[in-house]
Amino acid sequence: MGISNPRGRVDQYPFELSGGMRQRVLIASALACEPALLIADEPTTALDVTIQAQILDLIADLQQQLGISVVLITHDLGVVAGVCDRVLVMYSGRIVEEANIYDLYAKPQHPYAQGLLRSTPHFEVDVERLELIPGSPPDMKIEVAGCSFAPRCSEVSDRCRSERPTLQMLGSGQVACWNPLKVMQ
């Protein structure tokens, strides 16, 4: 687990541990009952880049050694690109796209997935400002008849406003969109 001096650490309070050490303790606790699935919800949030890499390496090593599956929940697309095989993109509590990592980054099909990737900084692209997804996220307390992304979508149609799309096979994945994008511009 990478916990130095575990016998000495057992009597420490969480506030006495570093962020990375707290994550290791949480992972060890989660694995104590030998689960087949580890759900890692934002395991690298608020950690510096070096510690993030150590935690992600630890999760990958445990996945290989123990033969467990890992569901990684994160908003960090850099982490997604580095460690995931398949990705579920969610918007407003619903899956809007599911694809293997290579297809998602090469040709996202849902306008929200495309917007996410366009708003992510890249080393090879020199931009003064990142692109923004227009509009505001929906109010989760209000039920929407159609697609919850419709008010922000560049591909919106009347059908989008009135009928919620369901996941449909498209290429190597699935997309919940009446007007899926064919290629990222």
Image (cartoon, rainbow, N blue to C red):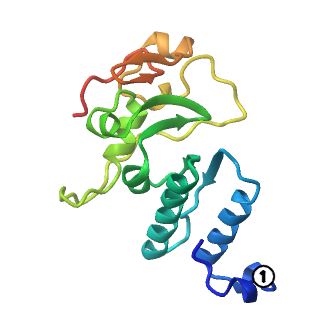
| x, y percent for residue 109 | 35, 27
- Of residues 130 and 6, the one nearer the viewer is 6
Residue shown at 62% from the left, 53% from the top: 41
Q: How busy is the neighbourhood of tag 1: few (under 14 within 10 Å), some, or many (20 plus)? A: few
The kind of residue on which mark 1 rests is Val
| Residue 88 left/right relative to 82 | right
Instruction: Count every numbered label the image shows and give the total.
Output: 1
Residue shown at 48% from the left, 68% from the top: 52
- Of residues 148 and 175, the one nearer the viewer is 175
Residue shown at 39% from the left, 43% from the top: 116
| x, y percent for residue 147 | 54, 22
- Of residues 142 and 91, the one nearer the viewer is 91
Helix, strand or loop under label 1:
loop
User: From the image, which quarter does the N terminus lie in?
Assistant: bottom right
| Residue 54 left/right relative to 180 | right
| x, y percent for residue 130 | 31, 54
The answer to whether residue 150 is above or below residue 40 is above
| Residue 183 left/right relative to 63 | left
User: Which residue lies under the disc numbered 1?
Assistant: 10
User: From the image, which quarter does the C terminus lie in?
Assistant: top left
Residue shown at 78% from the left, 85% from the top: 12
Dividing the picture into quadrants, the one containing residue 178 is: top left
The answer to whether residue 160 is above or below residue 43 is above
| x, y percent for residue 158 | 46, 11
| Residue 164 left/right relative to 119 | right
Dividing the picture into quadrants, the one containing residue 36 is: top right
